[in-house]
């Protein structure tokens, strides 16, 4: 018979299958009896794309939602206190576990199957009930909104705005170096749950894989610049993103850690709902984070001549979804039917401290 510590360990082993930027897994846990403190590691996310740790707080929101959903599978309930210590913003949650016969939310069964699919999506419309189920899945997450678009013209605009990220990344030395250094090139590294994006999950053609692997070489970088690789990547991804029959935007009303945690909980619920419908899912959020950095005057490492285009892309996304001036974009995604992803990223075992 499993003890309470065994059950808590089991919950955490499932919960860490939450999404995080570049599979950074920026969390650790402290267990004292039936109480688990969740802690944020500020050094495990891309600093340029992680304005005020917003991306990391979103990842923690997804993790926390997984804990709540996974607890009943192990016969537990999980009572969550978000940011329990005002003096320690790196402690994102305190979770009290109790033995329980609470029913299992169907979303919980998809936690370990949820993954990113960056392939082209099929030209197949989604049932209107799917958008309704997405909205219902986030109804309980306060201070967030979910916007959905299915109009092809609007999707093309958002696709082009989102793909600005690829061009900016490849043209910006600091971003390019961070991006290429985070790529995992072997299945062994990926299976070990190492931080970084496994190359096969990126669904790149072989010539693009070659360039990505050698972009740190000045000669290769020069050749890539001559052939306009950054612009080619933008156009290619615009077409790719536009294959989605549905795109969604999660917004928040305030810009603080609690709000970003809420956004993370919302995106995880939508993603799990999509997995339950057999849908592919792909967050395309980078340009939103760049826009927040520029707006708040924290754009170190970015190139000034990109600023206007990033602002325009952010505005195009908000306008296409009908978001108001007060709505702060937190997460953007595309979803639809697709062939299975070539690969998926694995996770390390939970980092637990007594």
Image: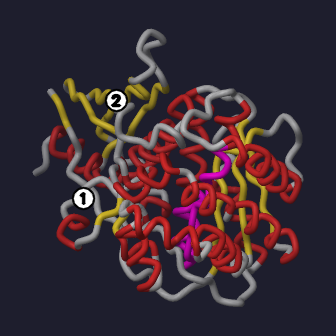
How many numbered badges does the structure rendering display? 2
Residue 318, relative to residue 298: is it above or below?
Answer: below
Residue 146: mark: none
Label 2 vs label 1, nearer the camera: 1
The magenta segment is 270-290
Q: Quadrant of residue 209?
A: bottom left
Residue 270, relative to residue 117: is it above or below?
Answer: above
Q: Residue at x 86, y 74 (%)?
A: 151
How many residues crowd mark 2 within 10 Å: few (<14), some (14–19), many (20+)? many
Tell me residue 299's x, y (percent). 62, 34
Q: Is residue 270 left or right of residue 125?
A: left
Tell me residue 61's x, y (percent). 50, 41
Q: Residue at x 71, y 89 (%)?
A: 124
Tell me residue 30's x, y (percent). 24, 28
Residue 39: mark: 2
Residue 165 versus residue 11: which sits nearer the camera? 165
Residue 272 versus residue 78: which sits nearer the camera? 272
Residue 353, relative to residue 185: is it above or below?
Answer: above
Asked if the stretch drawn in magenta spans residue 220, the answer is no
Q: Residue at x 44, y 84 (%)?
A: 207
User: Which of the marked residues, 2 or 1, is nearer the chain's N terminus?
Assistant: 2
* Secondary-structure class at tag 1: loop
Tell me residue 336's x, y (percent). 64, 78
Q: Which residue is mark 1?
A: 193
Q: Quadrant of the C terminus?
A: top left
How many residues crowd mark 1 within 10 Å: few (<14), some (14–19), many (20+)? some
Q: Residue at x 54, y 60 (%)?
A: 170
Q: Is residue 151 left or right of residue 342?
A: right
Asked if the stretch drawn in magenta spans residue 283, the answer is yes
| Distance in Å between CA atoms under marks 2 and 1 | 19 Å
Q: Quadrant of residue 228?
A: bottom right
* Secondary-structure class at tag 2: strand
């Amino acid at each position: 018979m499993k003890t309470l510590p065994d059950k808590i360990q089991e919950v955490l082993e499932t919960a860490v299958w939450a999404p995080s930027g570049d599979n950074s897994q920026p969390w650790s846990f402290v267990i004292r009896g039936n109480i688990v403190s969740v802690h944020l590691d500020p050094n495990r996310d891309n600093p340029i794309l992680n304005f005020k740790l917003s991306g990391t707080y979103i990842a923690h929101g997804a993790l926390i939602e997984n804990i709540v959903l996974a607890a009943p599978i192990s016969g537990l309930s999980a009572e969550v206190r978000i940011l329990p210590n005002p003096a320690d913003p790196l402690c994102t949650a305190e979770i009290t576990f109790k033995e329980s016969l609470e029913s299992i939310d169907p979303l919980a069964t998809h936690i370990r199957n949820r993954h990113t699919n960056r392939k082209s999506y099929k030209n197949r419309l989604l049932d209107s009930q799917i958008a309704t189920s997405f909205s219902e899945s986030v109804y309980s997450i306060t201070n967030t909104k979910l916007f959905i678009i299915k109009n092809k013209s609007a999707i093309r605009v958002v696709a082009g705005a989102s793909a600005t990220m690829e061009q900016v990344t490849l043209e910006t030395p600091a971003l390019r170096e961070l991006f290429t250094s985070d790529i995992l090139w072997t299945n062994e590294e990926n299976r070990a749950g190492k931080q970084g994006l496994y190359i096969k999950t990126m669904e790149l053609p072989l010539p693009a894989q070659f360039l990505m692997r050698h972009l740190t070489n000045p000669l290769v970088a020069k050749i890539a610049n001559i052939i306009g690789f950054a612009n080619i990547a933008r156009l290619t991804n615009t077409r790719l993103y536009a294959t989605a029959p549905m795109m969604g935007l999660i917004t928040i009303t305030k810009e603080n850690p609690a709000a970003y945690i809420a956004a993370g909980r919302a995106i995880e619920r939508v993603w799990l709902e999509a997995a339950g419908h057999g849908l592919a899912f792909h967050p395309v959020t980078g340009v939103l984070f760049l826009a927040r950095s520029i707006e708040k005057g924290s754009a170190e490492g970015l190139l000034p001549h990109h600023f206007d285009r990033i602002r325009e892309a952010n505005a195009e996304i908000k306008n296409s979804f009908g978001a108001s001036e007060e709505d702060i974009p937190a997460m953007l995604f595309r979803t639809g039917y697709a062939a299975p992803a070539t690969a998926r990223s694995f996770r390390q075992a939970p980092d637990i401290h007594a």
